Image (cartoon, grey):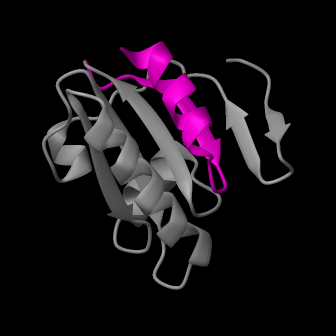
Amino acid sequence: MEEAAEINGRTKVSGHDGGTRLSAEDLGAEPGERATLVQFSSAFCQPCRATRRTLAEVADMVDGVTHVEIDAEARLDLVRELGILATPTVLVLDGNGRVVRRASGQPRRADVIAALGRAV
């Protein structure tokens, strides 16, 4: 795994999760053909709303990329399994559902696009 780094003091980014793969069943939705942006959110999380907009914009810009939002409170089993400690947390999955990037905090659009480069 790559070493964690602070970006703009609000987003912590790390590398892949040791080959962890998520299926459509795990996601509750069909993954993207090329990549999937998975967002763990909570109901009263203000940065989650901004993250939702950013990820949806990027998914709309890039063919074969899907954005899936998961309510962390409703999926505590998955949150615990993946070690999600804060919302928003974003996982970038490649076309096979393997986690290739993880970030907690509100990402910038440029950072999301760069992370997708590792997935596609």
Give x and y (percent) for residue 15: 63, 23
Along the line of sight, the residue nearer the viewer: 1 or 115? 115
For residue 30, above or below residue 39 = above
Give x and y (percent) for residue 18: 54, 19
Write the residue at 17% across / 24% down.
Answer: 33
Q: Is residue 53 left or right of residue 1?
A: left
Write the residue at 44% across / 67% down.
Answer: 72
For residue 25, above or below residue 70 = above
Q: Quadrant of the C terminus?
A: top left
Q: Quadrant of the N terminus?
A: top right
In the picture, residue 53 is in which quadrant?
A: bottom left
Along the line of sight, the residue nearer the viewer: 25 or 94? 94
Residue closest to the far bottom:
44
Residue 98 covered by magenta stretch: yes
In the picture, residue 14 is in which quadrant?
A: top right
Write the residue at 79% across / 31% down.
Answer: 4
Residues drawn in magenta: 96-120
